[in-house]
Image: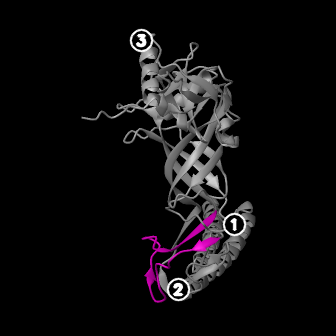
Amino acid sequence: MLLKRIPYRVIGVTTAALLAAGCGEKPPAMASHTPEVGVVTLASVAVPVTAELTGRTSAFVDAQVRARVDGIVLRREFTEGSVVKAGQRLYKIDPAPYIAQLNNAKASYAKAQANLISTTAQAERYKVLVAANAVSKQDYDNAVALQGQAQADVASAKAAIDTAQINLGYTDVTSPVTGQAGISQVTPGAYVQAAQATLMVTVQQLDPMYVDLTQSSLDGLKLRRQIQEGRLSTNGPNAAKVTLILEDGRVYSEQGKLQFSDVTVDPSTGSVTVRAVFLNKDRVLLPGMFVRARIEEGVNPDALVVPVQGVTHDQKGTPIAMVVDKDNKAALRPLVTSGTHGQNWVVDGGLKAGDRVIVEGIDKVRPGMEVKAVPAHLPEASADAATPASGA
């Protein structure tokens, strides 16, 4: 029986490993390794406080053109969807009845004037005769009264002429504002009524446009409290910036201005209305569109921000971050956040200025593990609000 010879090289390596184990030394492959993580050191920065609200657009001016006299529509004098000018005639209502009324009022006025001349002359004659006792005082008083009645009839006839002229003018249905005409609600030959205020067409001014947003009363209360406590500073409602996000997710090219915030809370929804105004030269915005808006309500001068890659969430949904403590060990911190700013989370609790937050290599560490902190390599947008930490 032949025995296989074991090379001296293998025996030497095995013997060295056994001797190292006997002396308490670990093999090279089992030596401990301190993981290297990228961190940022937090510093207080000024961050705009924004609120994202939903709402709908509405026309700057929404003028409903309605009939103010009864009659048959003779013709329409505009194109649906076109821009009409203030004072431009839109419809012509049959004026014949109102021309007749005006002529009748003018005739009544002439009759009243003639009667006034007669009664005035009689009152003047009786004035002379009563002084000579040729007529009774009662006859003179009656003549003066008839003169007064004639004067009233003249004034009434003049008012009737004015009314007839106004009604005749209403047969020319004009646009009260400059704007875009909608769909005509009546056609030539239709009978319109003043008593029913028949809607004929709607003219809307679309540049600028209103955006009516809803904000919960609780959010409004928080904002006012933060301003009172000095945590937020604001430049006034006229300087507030509003950014509009359209239905397709794109940001509208024009920035809006905050007009006002309603002072009454809707009891059915618990919200208030916030109105903003936007330029709309290209007619991108149309009345009734659903939009979202970001309103810059103020500035938090001492905010802490953490890059988004440094914040995760536990099973309960609580935001958490991993920091490097003074002993160069990883520690888990639950956070209180209030939204995002750019590529960063705005942190209201759980961290303080000077903390080193791990943003790179989080998957390599566990709480309590010793780590080696090095400055993180972040894009410029993320690094603006946090200063990279120096190596510990």
Please state the horizontal and vertical placement of residue 35, each as a whole percent of the image: 53, 27
Please state the horizontal and vertical placement of residue 247, each as a whole percent of the image: 50, 60
Tell whether position 205 is magenta: yes
Q: Residue 338 vs residue 238: left or right?
A: left
Q: Which mark is residue 237?
A: none
Of circles 2 and 3, which is in front? Answer: 3
Q: Label 1: how many residues lie within 10 Å, few (<14), some (14-19) or many (20+)?
A: few
Which residue position is annotated with label 3?
Answer: 22
Quadrant (top left, top right, bottom left, bottom right) of the N terminus: top left
Q: Residue at x 46, y 78 (%)?
A: 185
The image shows residue 199, relative to residue 299, as above or below, that is below
Protein image colouring: one colour
Which residue position is annotated with label 1?
Answer: 134
Tell whether position 18 is magenta: no
The image shows residue 97, relative to residue 175, as above or below, that is below
Of circles 1 and 2, which is in front? Answer: 2
Q: Which mark is residue 97?
A: 2
Residue 79: image quadrant is bottom right
Q: Secondary structure at mark 3?
A: helix
Give the CA distance from mark 1 to mark 2: 51 Å
User: Relative to the observer, which residue lies in front, 389 or 113?
Assistant: 389
Give the CA distance from mark 1 to mark 3: 160 Å
Q: Earlier in the sequence, mark 2 or mark 3?
A: 3
Indicate the amino acid at tag 2. Pro
Q: Which residues are magenta?
A: 179-207
User: Relative to the observer, which residue lies in front, 162 or 170?
Assistant: 170
Q: Label 2: how many residues lie within 10 Å, few (<14), some (14-19) or many (20+)?
A: few
The image shows residue 60, relative to residue 377, as above or below, that is below
Residue 77 showing in the rendered view: yes
Q: Secondary structure at mark 1?
A: loop
Please state the horizontal and vertical placement of residue 132, each as a whole percent of the image: 74, 63
